[in-house]
Image (cartoon, helix red, strand yellow):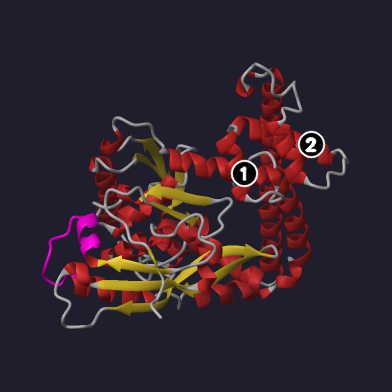
Amino acid sequence: MAKKSHKSYAKEDVRFIKKANELVEARYKFDIWETRIFAVTLSMIQPSDPDFKEYKINVGQVIEDFGLSKGGDIYQFLRDAALNLQKKIISIHSERNGYKTELTIPLFSGIERVIDERAKKDTEKNIWVTFEPRLKPFLLELKARYLIYDIRSILSIKSVHSIRIYELLKQYEKIGNRIFDIDELKLILGIAPNEYSLYGHFKDKVILKAQDDLNTNKETDIKFSFEEIKQGRKVVKLKFNIIPHQPERLSTVSWPPAQIKEELSLDELSALIEGLIPEDTLRQWVAKSSFDEVKVAIIYTMQRIKAGDKIKNVAAYVSKLIFQKSLPEFFGTVPPAQNKVVKEAQIHQKQERYRLEQQLERLKVEHYETQKNIVEGIFKHNEAVKYQIIEDLKYSRDWDRKRTDQQNLEREHIKTLIFMKAMQRFPEYFVALNETFEVESTALKKSLRQLGWIG
């Protein structure tokens, strides 16, 4: 029986890469060939896929996509890249039960490639890959906190670091800027502690290179400038200013494309309705009516439910509001977006969302400060603990042996590691605190998502 593969794509097709923020910020180090294989495979995943499929990578297609020269050892490079990805482990940082966690996982669970010597042409040389099933939460059924972009934005970029910086900044495009601690950014980019140990080298080889790659690439949809944040005379952080840019290929069309707008709209509706209605149903309603009408009907329905009304069939109730125009004050002759009731609901929603966002931010700050005070108390009553943690770090790859002990201890990354290792050694001091924080933050996030918050 023949294997069932997902369809491949032509260069002119619109193909989006979509992945959870945790995967964007994961710790890993790929070369440019591995990055290309990873990107091409991600672009084959469809929003409607209920599960991972076997994805077929055609060498001829990759050559065309990335503007590579035909012939030579291209197939060998791509084949080796796929095999290397199966062996490599990525580190995804997340949170469980109030504790920070690290998931180490391979990307691919299976690789199949053509080894028949009769295959001479690039079009006959294929690679089939299968994703590791445990990556499903980070690549499928994404409802919030994810990145989506057109693969064509990175096709002509030849630097791995530039591609990753593009993704990290693309996450914050709406905010307009993003600040990174330099040591943390190096960790995300997979740069070893002894690599680019001098800031000047890191700036020239990574940051300025990425700036040039993005700013001169006519197909990339963002550019950036950056500011150096100093502690004394030392540069410790970088603030990236993100500048939207319309790719040359889209000079005569609107941006972002309709496909991205549709997905973001559906995500907002899904968050508002708290998963009570399938995405396919929402998609059908928006196609037959309008996004504004569906959104208002959902907001009204959820307000009724929160007020104590028992609505047995939520989908039927919302559908009636939309298509039978059951709320004349919502759906009169005035377009929904201009209706006074809608505007008042939107203003109230915006104000409530801002209030809850500020409350969540205060909760995070208070939680961190309390953790910090507990750790300081531990070190105050037992200095040997801090000394032992520092001694252990000196033998780790995080400790820069080209710097003095004092210089290492001043690095934000080392301070964070000392803090985290103290928490790991004395978990009993933080259990009740973390459980309370988890309950309160989960409740706030739930309320925010009902108001369209994506986070």
Measuring 34% from the left and 40% from the top, which residue is drawn there?
A: 221
Image quarter of residue 160 = bottom left
Judge the density around disc 1: few (<14), some (14-19), many (≥20) Cα neighbours within 10 Å: many
Q: Give whichever of 26, 78 is nearer the camera.
A: 78
Secondary element under disc 2, as helix, strand or loop, is: helix
Q: Provide the secondary structure element on which disc 1 rests.
A: helix
Whole-percent x, y for residue 443 in the image: 75, 50
Lower position in the chain sequence, tag 1 or tag 2: 1
Q: Is residue 413 magenta?
A: no
- Whether residue 358 appears in this view of the structure is yes
Q: Amino acid at mark 2?
A: Gln
Residue type, numbered disc 1: Leu
Q: Nearer the viewer, residue 178 or 283?
A: 283
Q: Residue at x 50, y 41 (%)?
A: 262
Residue marked by disc 1: 282
**Residue 442 image position (x, y, % from top left):** 72, 53
Question: In the rendered view, does 378 fall on the left or right side of 252?
Answer: right
**Residue at x-position 60% and y-position 32%:** 289
- Disc 1 from disc 2: Cα separation: 18 Å
Left or right relative to 115: residue 356: right
The residue pinned by badge 2 equals 303
Considering only vertical position in the picture, is 261 above or below 21? above
Q: Which residues are magenta?
A: 60-74
Name the mark nearer the viewer: 1 or 2: 1
- Is residue 362 visible to the viewer in this orientation of the structure? no
